[in-house]
Image: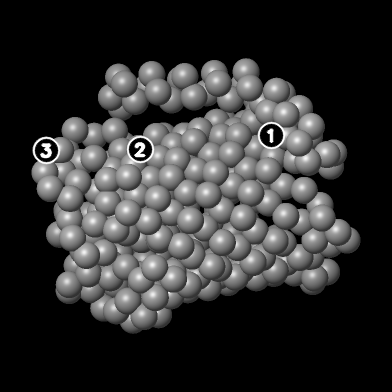
Amino acid sequence: MKRHTQATFGILGLALVAGASQASADVESLIGGDVSGEISAGWDSRYFYRGLWFGDETTWTNASVSKELASNLTGSVNLFYTDVMDDALSYSEGNIGAALSYDLGFGTLDLGFVHFRFYDGFAGTERGGVRGTGIAGNDEANEFNLTYSQDLFAGFSGHVLVGRDTTIDGTYGELGVSKSWEVSEGIGLDFSLTAGYSLDSYYTFPGDESEDWTHVLIGVALPMTLTETASLTPYVNVNMSKDSRDPTNSGVGRGGDEVYFGASLAVSF
């Protein structure tokens, strides 16, 4: 890990712990009580989003707030920012999202909207290089998504997601299952398996299949409770590129099965 990456992650972690209580008070003063949320920061050895590689050595921060709006209905707002720390590529991204979540009793239905901002273009820009054109040079994107999730069996949970990107008129589909175990007091083990699908040229590039599987992602995380409100979670993921991602990922040396890892520090309120 690079020295400046370590420093950035350390500063973010200290800011989380120091600012969580004040953030909770500020939010409650604005929108009233019954508010919950989380502030987190992390470092990833590689940044894959829906099976597509964006860069190596990234730091990120995230803040989310939710509030019960009515019986079985919850509203939430999420803010996210990430920045690639390697010397070869300039890539940074910020997004803001909002969602309504309805508890159906047997499952949960979420309707969401996300605005993405790509400060160095969607595909990033090589240090000293020229920003790409077409989709690769896009500055922003907007997505509406619908997610259904429910408990399955033997402690497993599952979800189905469909997202429509209105900027490129592309659609993404996703299936996922997950399960959590308690390893010991204060230490858990989380497993997840996700598969993505491009329905109609969802950020596919020359050589990619416009309608095919994008990737399969296998994840293992080890959440550790630090205090009543703080937790540290190291993880290891395996991203397996499929026909809608493999040609593009291979072009940047990231095809096939890619193992990457990272850690995050979160404070809830």
Nearest-to-viewer mark from 3 and 1 = 3
Task: Evaluate if marks 2 and 3 touch, with contact meaning CB atoms under 8 Å apart.
Answer: no
Tag 2: amino acid: Asp
Is disc 1 placed on a helix, strand or loop? strand
Which quarter of the figure is the C terminus placed in? top right
| Residue at the spot of label 2 | 83
On screen, 24 above or below 110?
above
Q: CA distance from mark 2 to mark 3?
A: 17 Å
Label 3 element class: loop
- Residue 268's disc number: 1
For residue 144, which numbered disc appears in the image?
none
The tag earlier along the polypeptide, 2 or 3, is 2
* 233 to 51, vertically: above or below: above
Q: Which residue is mark 3?
A: 128
Of circles 2 and 1, the one toward us is 2
Residue 225 seen in this snapshot: no
